[in-house]
Amino acid sequence: MEKDKRPGFYITTPIYYVNARPHIGHAYTTIVCDAIARRKRMLGFDTFLLTGTDEHGQKIERSAAAAGKTPRQFADEVSGLFRGLFERMNISNNDFIRTTEPRHERGVQQLFRVLRENGYIYKGTYTGQYCVYDEMYIDTAEAGAKCPECGRPTETVSEENYYFKLSAFADKLLKYFEDHPEFIRPETRRNEVIAFVRGGLRDLSISRSTFKWGIPVPDDPKHIVYVWLDALSNYCTAVGYGSDDPGERKKFETYWPADVHMIGKEIIRFHCVYWPAFLMAAGLPLPKAVIAHGWLLFEENKMSKSRGNIVRAETVIDVLGNDALRYFLLREIVFGQDGSFSFDAVVQRYNSDLANDLGNLASRTLTMISRYFNGSVPYPSPTVAHKDADDAIKRQAQSVIADFAQLFDDYQFSRAIECAWSLIGTVNKYLVEQEPWVVAEKEGEENKSRLATILYTAAEALRIVTALAHPVLPESTAKIWHQLGLGEISRLDLQTLQWGQLPLGGKLGKVEPVFPRADKSAIERMQTMEQERNAPAPPTTTPASSATPSTATPSPAAPSPVTPGAAGAVPATVAVATPAPAGDGKISIDDFLKVELRVGQVKFAEKVKGADKLLRLEVDIGTEVRQLVAGIALAYEPEALIGRKVVIVANLKPRKLRGLESNGMIVAASVGEDGKPVLAGFLEDVPVGAKLK
Ligand code: MSP
């Protein structure tokens, strides 16, 4: 086979931990990488996009145990969820690596051997603090201290380990950062890393020996490789490092070093200090750039399982489609900074920028060409019916092609999109001013020529915007491209894109709306879907323990991420901020006492319209009658509840469900595989309003 002459481009996402189901934060990084990869392919690069899952380590071992599964079963299930989601999102990854695959395990052992042979590994004993959530040694912390990264309690670890001579790399790293200013982006992160390295580097423990779920250290299988050395190596093992197969070796030569490691800002140290030091020690070239983006916040906090404020990508995709989610994340979030996610904002962006701006431009332009020119791209008139306004569009389009490229390739996605949309705005205005529908009513050749020029100009601008936006909106731009009669958009060569390439006389495809408007119910639908899906599994033990805050804020290690919450039995619990339980899943009595549990009596109950699982309840809690919305409709008929005494968490922040305010949570056990809710109650008679403690 002839060697591929195209320049290579290798981009990676972080590999995602399988301790929790994927959420929109994971989707964000993956979408950003996918958009970059798609643009590079359109520019003619031999592009390789890698994603995958990070499956070893103590955190996963504990999560699996808590879910009553073996680590492998657990990892298989959650990794499958990530893979399934990315397929559904139409992510164009060339590979999906799992750290439990033999090709990866072999590569990690190979790297370990090379580091050892090169004299950078020695045996020692680590006694100090460890954060299981971040899988990070915190050797400066005292026993009992909290993790400086995530605030969770650290655990004291004392074990025999292999150490990596990280301290030998401080000067080399600093020199590398100086010689390669483009290595870490953005600048603030670069400065942070430089300051960290200048502060001094201690040797790093790179093996664990007190648990089993990991890759055995070669020739000493009592030890397993530290999960971050294991995980970071994926970037090499996925493209053939450690393989004997000549094809795989060739692949490694072709793609390594990676052009971009895209990551969230919280894992910069692992990627910009440990990883380059490992590579230097192994004599391998370093990646060209590590780019750190900010966090997606929901209700002001980083989305995370332990905060219970997770939004799933599927929710937005189900209601508005893949492109709506991609557009929102790339347009609304200023890349590199933290940004807020809200359903209102997604719908607003969708309606204004996609349905209104791009959707309108496409549908009115193409519909008029169909109507007035029988669906063939009209010939613009170079002379008689030509106006300055037409030239202005052409000029703007040419500069948008150049500006978009510069901004997008500089990771300024929001500004790049804004720039393309400025052309849409201008053309929509041009159509209003030129009134082709009025010109069409007039007789004569000159008017016919004028109409042709206006519609050609609009269609050509539409073609250019569609081509530029393709990496951001792959599905809808492919449809518009077909409607323009241009066939497969993936064949387009973006490098040669310029004004005037729309084939004259070309036949349009079938013209159909691409972005149907979303009405207000879209927001409510997404909120309800999320609350129903997100409801943490209610307690399955006794009613008394069922009311502890750990039901409202799952411990990082406790709940099964795979089994869905109990049919939304306690939907009002989402996003309640309570202190994170200790690493062993225990909370203090003070934390427990923050939860106000009361006996209530159901005064009224009815089904919530359009929501199979929800009941609206009015519950007397002694001091007042509260409205609650609870996901118990599949288990209880409303009439059967009237007069029944129940246990209520009375001090939860109110939440809206299907537009109804829910003031508290009803306590239920979750029974059986499908988590059927069974309400907590009492054998003895208890007065309404009595407190539980
Ligand atoms: N497994 C490690 C990475 C190893 S890479 C060799 C890990 N996994 S993770 O699942 O916790 O998160 C990985 C990435 O998901 C983050 O770096 C970030 O890119 C993305 N995000 C997770 N939550 C996010 C937000 N709330 N917002 C934006 N991105 C988020 O760390």
Image (cartoon, rainbow, N blue to C red):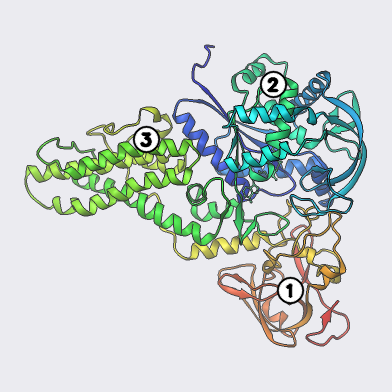
What label does residue 91 carry, if any? none
Asked whether, in this view, residue 284 is left or right of residue 325, the answer is: right
Whichever of labels 2 and 1 marks the residue nearer the N terminus, that label is 2
Element assignment for label 2: loop
Residue that label 2 marks:
284
Label 2: how many Cα within 10 Å (few below 14, some 14–19, many 20+):
some
When the figure is inspected, residue 646 is found, relative to residue 379, above or below; the finding is below
Instruction: Check disc 2 and give the amino acid type.
Output: Leu
Camera-side residue of 166 and 668:
166
| Residue type, label 3 | Ala
* Residue depth check, mark 2 versus mark 1: number of the one nearer the observer: 2
Residue highlighted by disc 1: 666
The residue pinned by badge 3 equals: 402
* Labels 3 and 1: the sequence-earlier one: 3
Distance between the alpha carbons at the discs numbered 3 and 1: 58 Å
* Image quadrant assignment for residue 222: top right
Is residue 6 left or right of 234 when viewed as pictured? Answer: left
